[in-house]
C-alpha cells in the first residue's frame, strides 16, 4: 500500500506534468498543422515524414552553421518544400492523398537515415547547438504550477500561442472561413470567385512548416541537438489521431495531444516497476482507444440522425 501511495505521488507530481508538456509539444505543433489541412479537405497522413525531415535538417543546419536558430530556419525551409511537394501531387496531380502520404513517410525515413549515416556516422548526431530552455523567474517559483511550466524549450510556450492564433484564424477571420469552405463547400467558394485549390496549397505549406518546427523542437529542443534514425517514432500518426479526435478544432486537438503526452510521461514514471517495453506502448494504446471512440461516436450520431429524420437519411442513401 505504501509503495502504491509513493507511485501515485510520483505520477501526480509537477515533474510528471512538466514531462507531459515536453512530450506533447512535438505532437501538438504537428497536429495543429494537420488541423489546417483537415479543414481544407486534405487527409494528411504524411505528417510523420514531415516531422522526421524537420528533425534531421534542423540538426544538420545546427551542425553546418553552429547555431540552433540557423538549424530551425533550415528546418522551416525544408518544411515549405515538403509542403509544396505534398500539395503538388495531391492538389495539382490529383493523386491519392493516402498513397502520397505513405510514400512521403517512406521517403523521409530513407533519406534521413542515409544522410545521417553519411554525415554523422552510424551513431547519429549528438550534442550539436540546441535551443535553450527558458526559465520564468518568479513564475517558476510558484508551488506546483511553476514546476510544471518552467524550464521548457521556447516551442512549448509557442505551441500554446499557436493554439490561440489558429483558433482565431480558423473560426473568426474571412481567410479561415475560406479555408473551411475549401474543404466543406468548394463549389460555393468558386461561386464567390475564390480558388479552393489555392487555400489547399496554403494549408499544405503551413502544415509542412508546422510539422518541420515540431521535428526541429524534437531534435534541437527536447533532445538537445540529437538526431537518431526514425526518431519521430510515429508521432505524426499520433498527431493525425489527435486531429481526428479533436475534430480539427485547434483547442481540442491540443488537449488531445496533452492527453498523449500525459500517458507518455506516466509510462516513463512506471518504468521502475513495469518493463519499459510495456510502458512504451501505453500512449500508443491510448491513441488507438481515442480512434475507436471517434468511430463509435460517429456511428452513434449517424444512427441518431436517422431516427430523427429517416426520410433525409433515406434520401441521402
Image (cartoon, helix red, strand yellow):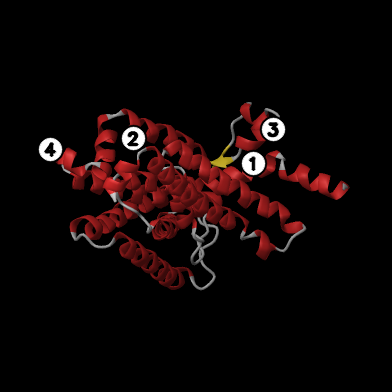
Q: Distance between the residues labelled 2 and 4?
A: 21 Å
Of 135 and 100, nearer the camera is 100
Q: What element carries label 2?
A: helix
Residue 243 in view (yes/no): no
> What mark, if any, has residue 144 been given in the picture?
3
Q: Distance between the residues labelled 1 and 3?
A: 10 Å
User: Badge 1 is on which residue?
Assistant: 17
Callout 2 crowding tier (Cα within 10 Å): few <14, some 14–19, many ≥20: many
Which-is-in-front pick, marks 3 and 2? 2
Q: How far apart are marks 1 and 2 (CA)?
A: 29 Å
Q: Earlier in the sequence, mark 4 or mark 1?
A: 1
Task: Tell me: residue 68, above or below residue 143.
Answer: below
Q: Which of marks 1 and 2 is nearer the N terminus?
A: 1
Residue 260, x across and y down, in percent: 56, 49
Q: Distance between the residues labelled 3 and 4?
A: 54 Å
Of 175 and 108, nearer the camera is 175
Q: What element carries label 4?
A: helix
Q: Distance between the residues labelled 4 and 1?
A: 49 Å
Residue occupying image coordinates x 77% and y 44%: 8
The reply to whether dot 2 and dot 4 touch (C-beta < 8 Å) is no
> What mark, if any, has residue 191 been given in the picture?
4
Residue 307, x across and y down, in percent: 41, 41
Answer with left or right where residue 115 lies relative to residue 198.
right
Q: Distance between the residues labelled 3 and 2?
A: 34 Å
Of 303 and 192, nearer the camera is 303
Answer with left or right where residue 229 lies relative to residue 167.
right
Residue 76, x across and y down, in percent: 35, 50
Amino acid at each position: 500500500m505504501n509503495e502504491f501511495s509513493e507511485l501515485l505521488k510520483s505520477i501526480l507530481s509537477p515533474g510528471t506534468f512538466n514531462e507531459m508538456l515536453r512530450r506533447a509539444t512535438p505532437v501538438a505543433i504537428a497536429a495543429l498543422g494537420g488541423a489546417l489541412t483537415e479543414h481544407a479537405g486534405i487527409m494528411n497522413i504524411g505528417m510523420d515524414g514531415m516531422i522526421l525531415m524537420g528533425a534531421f535538417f534542423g540538426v544538420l543546419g545546427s551542425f553546418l552553421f553552429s547555431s540552433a536558430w540557423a538549424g530551425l530556419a533550415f528546418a522551416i525551409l525544408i518544411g515549405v518544400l515538403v509542403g509544396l511537394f505534398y500539395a503538388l501531387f495531391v492538389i495539382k496531380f490529383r493523386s491519392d492523398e493516402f498513397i502520397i502520404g505513405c510514400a512521403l513517410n517512406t521517403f523521409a525515413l530513407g533519406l534521413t537515415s542515409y544522410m545521417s549515416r553519411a554525415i554523422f556516422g552510424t551513431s547519429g548526431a549528438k550534442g550539436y547547438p540546441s535551443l535553450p530552455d527558458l526559465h520564468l523567474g518568479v513564475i517558476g517559483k510558484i508551488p506546483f504550477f511553476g514546476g510544471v511550466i518552467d524550464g521548457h524549450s521556447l516551442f512549448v510556450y509557442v505551441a500554446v500561442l499557436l493554439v490561440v492564433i489558429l483558433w482565431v484564424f480558423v473560426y473568426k477571420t474571412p481567410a479561415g472561413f475560406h479555408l473551411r469552405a475549401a474543404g466543406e463547400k468548394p463549389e460555393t467558394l468558386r461561386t464567390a470567385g475564390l480558388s479552393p485549390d489555392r487555400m489547399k496549397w496554403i494549408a499544405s505549406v503551413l502544415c509542412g512548416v508546422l510539422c518541420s518546427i515540431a521535428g526541429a523542437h524534437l531534435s534541437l529542443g527536447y533532445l538537445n541537438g540529437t538526431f537518431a534514425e526514425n526518431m519521430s517514432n510515429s508521432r505524426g500518426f499520433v498527431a493525425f489521431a489527435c486531429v481526428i479526435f479533436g475534430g480539427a478544432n485547434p483547442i481540442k486537438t491540443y488537449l488531445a495531444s496533452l492527453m498523449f503526452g500525459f500517458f507518455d510521461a506516466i509510462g516513463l514514471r512506471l518504468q521502475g516497476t513495469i518493463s519499459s517495453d510495456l510502458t512504451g506502448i501505453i500512449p500508443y494504446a491510448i491513441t488507438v482507444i481515442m480512434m475507436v471512440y471517434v468511430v463509435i461516436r460517429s456511428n452513434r450520431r449517424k444512427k441518431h440522425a436517422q431516427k430523427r429524420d429517416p426520410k433525409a437519411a433515406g434520401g441521402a442513401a
